[in-house]
Image (tube, helix red, strand yellow):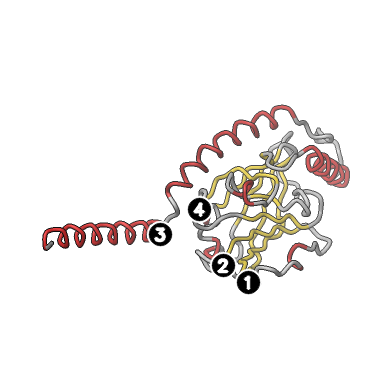
Amino acid sequence: MRRTARVLGTLLIVAGLGTLAWAITVWQWQDPVTAVVNRVEQRELSQKLERSFDRVRPSVQGVAVSPAQRRRGLERDAGAWRKMSAEGDAIAKIRIPRLGLNAVVVNGTDSDTLKRGPGRYLGSAMPGQGELVYIAGHRTTYGAPFSRIDRLRKGDRVFLELPYGSFEYSVTGHRIVEADELSVLESEGREQLALQACHPRFFATHRYIAYAKPVGVTPPDRGGDDS
């Protein structure tokens, strides 16, 4: 009996230490199991997006066009890309230097889609449409793209690359709202990027939303900025 008790005690200690190590790993980094799943999904999405980059061409090209013509062209291309993108499709590359993030953005925010990467809320706009662009992402599982979203500071840059142009945004601030607050999904009639994650980490009672304003656009047919 004593031997059995010692064995059981040892097993419980090992199990406890394993659970503690797992919790620390997830807290400091992310869930390693779902991270592997996400990595495979991201690789596949990246390949599909690259094919889209090769296939899609902007409607307005050349240096002779006016800024107004180029802006209208971007709006048309953004609208067309939004219409042709199905739920779950790869639609953009997102890069956030402050967070060390390079990922593919998917179209949609349902649970299955967000397992593949950060997702654009279908009711929001595409970059270049002059409205709210709303992107959500996980904090602890499936790659945890927005794990450290609360580290973003005013002035930090966010880059979104799409087949019709590359967009640069500057973080302006953040807000924390309850999980069922739907007013944050409404556009204010101007181009604005919102990045959303659950708050606090490991809970879903609230949402942490970082906002950013557009500061530059680089059409794919030239190397300069059209702010």
Residue 103, relative to residue 50: is it above or below?
below
Find residue 13 and name its label: none
Dot 2, how many residues are within 10 Å of its Cα: few (below 14), some (14-19), or many (20+)? many
Kind of residue at badge 3: Gln
Mark 1 surroundings: few (<14), some (14-19) or many (≥20) residues within 10 A: some
Contact between labelled residues 4 and 1, with CB atoms less than 8 Å apart: no
How far apart, in angstroms, are the residues tagged by discs 1 and 4? 20 Å
What is the CA distance from the residue labelled 1 to the residue labelled 2? Answer: 8 Å
Q: Which residue is mark 4?
A: 141
Q: CA distance from mark 4 to mark 2?
A: 14 Å
Q: Secondary structure at mark 4?
A: loop
Q: Which residue is mark 2?
A: 199
Q: Which callout, 1 or 2, points at the residue further toward the start of the chain?
A: 1
Res. 176 mark: 1
Q: Position of residue 183 (x, y in %)?
A: 76, 68
Tag 4: amino acid? Thr
Q: Choose mark 1 or mark 2, whichever is in front.
A: 2
Query: Which structural element holds mark 1?
Result: strand
Which of pointers 1 and 3 lies earlier in the amino acid sequence? Answer: 3
Determine contact: label 1, label 2, CB under 8 Å.
yes
Which residue is located at x 80 percent, y 56 percent?
131
Residue 223 as seen in the image, left or right of residue 131? left
Q: Is residue 18 left or right of residue 227?
A: left
Nearest the camera: 16 or 34?
16
Q: State the residue at coordinates (63%, 43%).
A: 93
Please rate how many residues cluster around mark 3, counting C-alpha atoms within 10 Å: few if below 14, some from 14 to 19, many from 20: few
Q: Which mark is residue 28?
A: 3
Residue under the image location 58 percent in, 63 percent down: 198
